[in-house]
Image (tube, helix red, strand yellow):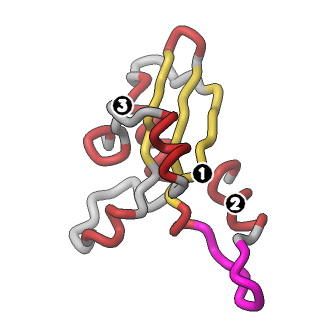
Amino acid sequence: MDQSNRYADLSLKEEDLIEGGKHILVAYKMKPVDGVGYLEAAAHFAAESSTGTNVEVSTTDDFTKGVDALVYHIDEATEDMRIAYPMELFDRNVTDGRMMLVSFLTLVIG
């Protein structure tokens, strides 16, 4: 299932994402299995680690799409992919409002 239309935006610039301060940027090394395109695999990775599933969902709304992780850079030759995770995806501690490390680790390394 190619999800690159929703979970990839290669026009995003890392400098702008950093300056905006609304995403956590994560770099990965990735080599897709034979027969799967690099962008398609990267977008699937972003989907599965944020709001996506392996099936079509008819109840997706604007809020859900607003917290999608986005592939913003790929370099197939170096097996480099970079994903921007919106801050809203990360749980916050109820006592002090800080982001919880376990939430970060769950999203970025599974």
Residue type, label 2? Phe
**Magenta region:** 90-98
Query: Going 33% across and 31% down the picture, which residue do you hit?
Result: 11
- Report the front residue among 19 and 93: 19
Question: Which of the 4 image quadrants contains residue 21?
Answer: bottom right
Q: Quadrant of the N terminus?
A: top left
Give how far across and how far down residue 16 sits, in percent.
45, 40
CB contact under 8 Å: marks 2 and 1: yes
Query: Going 65% across and 50% down the picture, which residue do you hit?
Result: 108
Circle 3 crowding by C-alpha within 10 Å: few under 14, some 14–19, many from 20: some
3D distance between C-alphas at marks 3 and 1: 16 Å
Q: Is residue 101 left or right of residue 74?
A: right
Give how far across and how far down residue 61 sits, in percent.
25, 72
Residue under circle 3?
Answer: 10
- Report the front residue among 100 and 50: 100
Report the magenta stretch's main SS. loop
Residue under circle 2?
Answer: 104
Residue 106 higher or lower than 30, as above or below: below
**Element under disc 3:** loop
Residue under circle 1?
Answer: 24
Q: Does the magenta segment cover residue 82?
A: no
Query: Going 51% across and 35% down the picture, which residue do you hit?
Result: 15
Question: Which of the 4 image quadrants contains residue 105?
Answer: bottom right
3D distance between C-alphas at marks 2 and 1: 9 Å
Looking at the image, tell me whether mark 2 or mark 3 is earlier in sequence order: 3
Residue type, label 3? Leu
Give how far across and how far down residue 37 sits, in percent.
38, 22
Q: Is residue 102 left or right of residue 22?
A: right
